[in-house]
Image (spheres, rainbow, N blue to C red):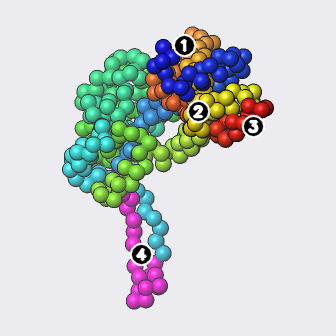
């Protein structure tokens, strides 16, 4: 078998076998580092995915609305002289101009996966003497459910939404003492009102949303809000949610509308997610640095211990390049084997976490997904770390004078 192996591999494996205890300790050190990287990366990714899904599963990535109304001040002949001081006017509920054309242009983009027009405005839910302020949301169910998976949030009834149907949150239902099949009167500030039948109760995991959001058919909301044939907003979901701010800026410029991304709306959440990602990279860097120093220190000792053998190899015709590759191979092998062992240990930690970290009802805190790319990247990083860590001692070994090395 050795006849088919390069000289560098034969020498490297022999050196690793002769120093079994050192090799084992180095591999264990590399494996511990890899296990930490695998476990922490999977854990942080799970936390981020859980937060992201919980928050963005109940709202669009981008919301388009009409541009704000502004009042331009009158000026005299002199540009610096204003004839009146004007305040910004109160914004009234308006429709997006030519919204059907806007929807078609949005659907033509490759980076947009779902578009849903809506008519949203303030209203009141009335039952007897009880009156609750609500946010009336008129939707086309087929389009809107691609933005927010409302059917999966239904706790009672169904998500079917005909012209006279309504979906309300569990908090609003509890406050008004309503249930599925009962009637709810909705009244707007302008005096328009209508009676709807409650078809379903939903739970978005947010008390505020569960107590204020009322979903009706788009035409019913248009009639109540005085938006005849119009929509007050267009909800958008993207293929890559983290590009929302860039896409929103493009839409503001190309369509002349107000486009607000979730990154702007939830700035603190986005900052927290970015901080977690940076923290994860920092952990990986310092763990890899510790592994590299461990491998380098062991190989430095190995070079000192095997100086005579290195001198003999040089005297027998081994080139400096071959000696250099012998120790580089050792570092790469230690890093690769350590990545295999560490990946297995890290996976075990993940499964142990799943068994221990449980909610009171026995379910997981949040799902943790172990992706193949995580193991591939970890293996590559560990192997390269071992290779780079081995370079200084390998260079030292290659520079040894054969005569001085043999003499000791």
The answer to whether residue 85 shows anywhere in this view is yes
Circles 1 and 2: CB distance less than 8 Å? no
| Residue located beneath label 1 in the image | 363
Q: CA distance from mark 1 to mark 3?
A: 67 Å
Q: Earlier in the sequence, mark 2 or mark 4?
A: 4
- The structure residue drawn at horizontal position 62% and vertical position 19%, both measured from the top left corner, is 14
- Nearer mark to the viewer, of 1 and 4: 1
Q: Earlier in the sequence, mark 1 or mark 4?
A: 4
As helix, strand or loop, the secondary structure at mark 1 comes to loop
The residue under label 4 is: 73
Residue, disc 3? 404
How many numbered badges does the structure rendering display? Answer: 4
Q: Quadrant of residue 186?
A: top left
| Disc assigned to residue 317 | 2
Q: CA distance from mark 1 to mark 2?
A: 65 Å
Q: How far across and down, in percent of the image, does residue 11 sit?
A: 59, 24
Q: Quadrant of the C terminus?
A: top right
Pointer 3 local density, CA inside 10 Å: few below 14, some 14–19, many at least 20: few
Task: Where is residue 142? Give x, y as percent.
Answer: 26, 30
Q: Quadrant location of residue 108? A: top left
Sequence-first disc among 3 and 4: 4
* Measured Cα–Cα span from mark 2 to mark 3: 16 Å
Q: Earlier in the sequence, mark 2 or mark 3?
A: 2
Residue bounds of the magenta highlight: 65-84
């Amino acid at each position: 078998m050795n006849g088919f192996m390069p000289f560098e591999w034969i020498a490297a494996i022999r050196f690793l076998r002769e120093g079994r205890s050192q090799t084992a300790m180095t591999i264990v050190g590399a494996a511990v580092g890899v296990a930490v990287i695998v476990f922490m990366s999977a854990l942080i990714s799970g936390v981020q995915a859980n937060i992201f899904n919980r928050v963005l599963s109940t709202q669009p990535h981008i919301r388009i609305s009409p541009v704000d109304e502004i009042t331009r001040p009158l000026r005299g002949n002199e540009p610096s002289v204003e004839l009146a001081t004007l305040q910004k006017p109160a914004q009234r509920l308006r429709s997006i101009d030519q919204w059907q054309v806007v929807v078609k242009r949005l659907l033509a983009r490759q980076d947009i996966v779902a578009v849903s027009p809506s008519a949203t405005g303030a209203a009141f839910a009335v039952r007897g003497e009880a009156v609750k302020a609500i946010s009336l949301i008129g939707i086309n169910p087929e389009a809107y459910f691609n933005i927010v998976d409302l059917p999966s949030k239904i706790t009672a009834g169904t998500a079917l939404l005909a012209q006279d149907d309504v979906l309300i949150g569990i908090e609003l239902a509890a406050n008004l003492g309503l249930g599925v099949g009962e009637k709810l009167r909705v009244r707007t500030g302008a005096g328009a009102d209508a009676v709807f039948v409650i078809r379903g109760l939903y739970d978005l995991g947010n008390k505020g949303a569960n107590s204020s959001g009322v979903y009706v058919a788009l035409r019913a909301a248009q009639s109540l809000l005085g938006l005849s044939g119009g929509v007050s907003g267009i909800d958008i979901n993207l293929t890559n949610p983290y590009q929302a701010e860039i896409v929103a800026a493009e839409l503001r410029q190309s369509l002349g509308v107000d486009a607000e991304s979730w990154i702007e709306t939830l700035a603190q959440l986005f900052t927290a997610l970015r901080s977690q990602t940076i923290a994860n990279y920092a952990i990986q860097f310092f763990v890899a640095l510790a592994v590299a120093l461990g491998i380098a220190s062991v190989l430095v000792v190995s070079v000192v211990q095997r100086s005579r053998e290195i001198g003999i190899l040089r005297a027998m015709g081994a080139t400096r390049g071959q000696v250099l590759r012998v120790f580089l191979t050792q570092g790469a092998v230690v890093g690769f084997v350590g990545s295999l062992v560490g990946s297995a240990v890290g996976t075990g930690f993940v499964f142990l976490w799943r068994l221990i970290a449980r909610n009171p009802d026995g379910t997981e805190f949040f799902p943790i997904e172990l992706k193949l790319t995580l193991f591939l990247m970890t293996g590559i990083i560990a192997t390269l770390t071992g290779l780079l860590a081995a370079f200084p001692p390998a260079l030292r070994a290659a520079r040894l004078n054969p005569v001085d090395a043999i003499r000791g």
